[in-house]
Amino acid sequence: MKSLKKVLALTLVMLMVLALAGTVYGKDYPKKDVYVICPWGAGGGTDVCLRALCQAMGEELGVNLTVDNITGGGGIVGHQAIANAEPDGYNIGMITFELSTYLSLGTELTWENYDLLGRVNTDAAALSVNAKWAADNGITDLASFVAYAKAHPGIQLGGSSNASVWHIAGGYLEEATGIDVEMITYQTGAAAAVKAAASGEIAGVTVSLAEASSFLQSGTLVCLGVMDAERNAKFPNVPTFREQGVDVIYGTWRGMGAPKGMSAEALAALREAVAKACQNKTFVEAMANLGQTISYLDAAEYGAFLKNNAEAVAASMKALGLNQD
């Protein structure tokens, strides 16, 4: 009898230790689905990247990650919603390049408002134009576009919202080629700009290849060049700007962030899920199909990157006249 009591007592102690270990090391997290905020509209590059990532993270965490598009204010509304969310481990979001522009635009929102989970993607800007418009005007490459633009200043190109990554890309295009274009902004994101270019409302866009992928594949849009050091693996026939004599490399980044104050256990679990998701076959294949680049940085590396990026972007915006001053 005494022996049985000892066994029961030891069993109880072991169960308590295991329960405590589960609490300390986050084994009980997550217990329910995770809510994920996307600051940009459905169908855009950020949205499709995030949804693919959430599927892979869900496989790692064993729960569903549900995406909600909270748009407006050039991404500020969604970014602020992530920062203001309950830090309970069940509210996270994707933060993007535009976060580095907000301080110059007069807001207080910066990368330091978040607990970082990791960077997952970088994506170069590209110049894609309406295929019919290009054919009607004898435009077949970057050089012929530049020549036409110099003869017809004020060509309308779309980016995304004001002072967003793809809006600033238009400024880089002007600076690098000496042309004068009119950038049309779309507050919900690049998807609206791409649709406008495909329908002929504007001549083209300065968004990534991934953003314009479906229209490029259908032949409605044609890409004249990508602002990268190398060609995109999904679009190997699209030359870089550099190959065509215009030395400019420029693009966006995307990563995951959470409201500050989350428990160490949940934070560690989410960071691990992001890291593993970037190697997950589901995500790797999805990104390859989208033509997007996986470029993972852990939380510490991401923080250092964001600090440097914020400083560089502020200087570029000042040079392009896009800051509030």
Image (tube, rainbow, N blue to C red):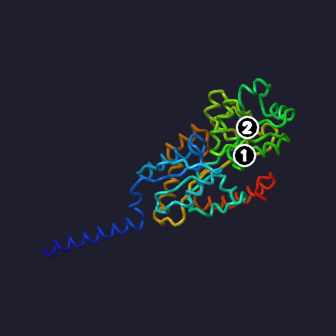
Q: On the picture, is 249 further left or further right than 52?
A: right
**Looking at the picture, how far across and down is residue 64, in whole percent?**
43, 49
From the viewer's perspective, is 67 left or right of 119? left
Pointers 2 and 1 in contact (C-beta within 8 Å): no
Badge 1 element: helix
Residue type (three-letter) at the residue carrying disc 1: His
* Residue identified by numbered label 2: 127
Provide residue 50's location: percent of width, then percent of height.
Answer: 55, 47
Task: Say few, some or many: other residues with alpha carbon within 10 Å of mark 1 (under 14 / 14 to 19 / 20 or more).
Answer: many
Image mark for residue 167: 1
Q: Residue at x 77, y 28 (%)?
A: 140
**Residue 210 visible to the viewer:** no
Task: Choose mark 2 or mark 1, whichever is in front.
Answer: 1
Q: Kindly indicate the quadrant of the structure image that contains residue 229.
A: top right
- Residue 319 quadrant: bottom right
Relative placement, left or right, of 110 versus 42 is: right
